[in-house]
Amino acid sequence: MILAFEDVVKSYGAIRALEGLSFGVQRGEVVALLGPNGAGKTTALEIALGIRRCDAGAVTVFDGSPQDVCVRRRFGVTPQHTGFPDVLRVDEILAFVAQHYPAPASLDETRAAFGLEQIRRRRANTLSGGQSRRLALALAFIGNPELVVLDEPTVGLDVQSRRRLWEAVRNASGGGSILFTTHDLEEAQAHASRIMVINHGRLLFDGSTQELRARTGTRRLSYIGLGGPVVVTLEDTDEYVRDLVRSGAAFADLEISRPSLEEAFLSLTGETS
Amino acid sequence: MNALTLVRAHVTMTFLDLVRWPGYVVPTVVFPAMFFVFFDLSFARESSANAAFLTLAFMVFAVVGVTFYQFGVNIALDRGRPWERYLRTLPVTAIERFTARIVTAMIFALATAAVVALVALAFTPIHLSLVQWLLVLLYCIAGGVPFVFIGITIGYWASARAAMPIATATNLLLAYAGGLWIPPKLLPPFVQAISPYLPTREFANLVWSITGRGSAAPALLGLATYTVVFAVTAVLVYRRDERTRYA
């Protein structure tokens, strides 16, 4: 286990952010940590990275404390907000971070992997949102870490940028472990070998993407019937559609979709309560 | 990736982040020399003794000002930034980062003091031996230590918005009352009464001792006392910030 949380509790005043959270990340795993705003994802990551301390429980990274500099040499981070110094150039920021690690990746390779060649001399305050995110991700990988932690790595990006970023992450990771947070269930299913869902600081689900699919295997079916819009959530949509057609009732704009993340949460929360 | 490499990396990063803002660099480096030219150059040109007295006072003013802004204002601005949070995830210790901040401040402080010295060398009859100039350099570094801790105290105590006016007001008041702009004997009587106890006056006394005005020992003792007092306050406000921001 390269990262382990054992009964971790964290409060901010009267607010309980983490309520006995336990999980682990094995070498080579790509783990998605899912949850709505305020679920405790960022708090969990900040404790894993040594930015914050937990009130109770234990957190170990590579069998040591995340505050230990030797441990920090083994992980790389992309925080949710980076806020690079405005006047530093892309190359300067990469070189600066690379100097913290014993065997960093070459700047050329990193620039190529994250599409930074064309903007290498640009100052941080002239980068677009997508370029800033690419740079932030490159920083997580430049130290050749064994564990990479990404806090909402693609938030605010369009679909194409997301796809390009994930391609870069897959190429750069080289079989290393990745722990990332996201709001996007589809993104988690597409890129993670394991998914953890937390809400109100508790772990609601921990398993493979297949298990999650089975767990939230319902479909959302909507159409406009004679009486107005109809929305139903059910497992066997085929049978419902067959019945609908057989009934001869008029309908339009039939749409079948996977449940949203919120709907999946409601389902999970219902099962655990 | 040893401590020296990391300190150098952080000094370079901080230095570039400051030096590329002309709005910061020009006023910081030029302001004390400009004050010197506007208010005291004519007096400094009267004699070698006047020149040394006033030049050294303005060099102290330069060091104090830069230290206040680098620590007081920059810490207050930095500690709320996401970049600061990111830096805490890197394999670097707080001591290495503080050392880098001190080295960067020293570079700017000595550069600012050097501009005052160059103006004095160009336009006044100042005459100091090489040994005296080296002592000025040494005392400027040593005398700046308590101001580093005053700056850190302001930086971790004040909000980002409040730090600039607080640092400016403290700097200007201490400079004036410490006799850095006008000789202490020309200060109003009530200011004269408190002036000898101020850290800026102790700093000036230390540097003036190079020209035979008084002894360095009492000034060093005074500065050491201020160092201890403000080191304690700096640690207290730093810990408070750590508790509220990162606990």
Image (cartoon, coloured by chain):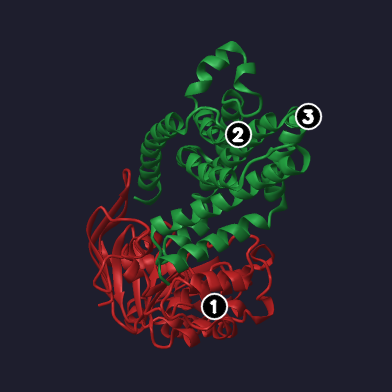
Residue A255 badge: 1
Q: How far apart are the two marked residues, 1 and 2, measured between alpha carbons?
A: 61 Å
> For the residue carrying disc 3, how many other residues have a C-alpha within 10 Å: few (<14), some (14-19), or many (20+)?
some
**Which residue sits at x=53%, y=85%?**
A167
SS assignment at label 2 = helix
Residue B42 badge: 3
Dot 2 and dot 3 residues touching (CB under 8 Å) = no
- Asked if badge 2 and badge 3 are on a common chain, one would say yes
**Which residue sits at x=46%, y=38%?**
B146
The residue closer to the viewer here, B179 or B97, is B179
Q: Amino acid at mark 1?
A: Glu
Q: How far apart are the two marked residues, 1 and 3, measured between alpha carbons?
A: 86 Å
Mark 1 chain: A
Q: Dot 2 corresponds to which residue? A: B165
Give the chain ID for the green colour.
B
- Asked if badge 1 and badge 3 are on a common chain, one would say no
Residue A71 visible, this angle = yes
The residue closer to the viewer here, A78 or B167, is B167
**Which x, y percent locates residue B19?**
66, 56
Q: Amino acid at mark 3?
A: Ser
The residue closer to the viewer here, A51 or A35, is A51
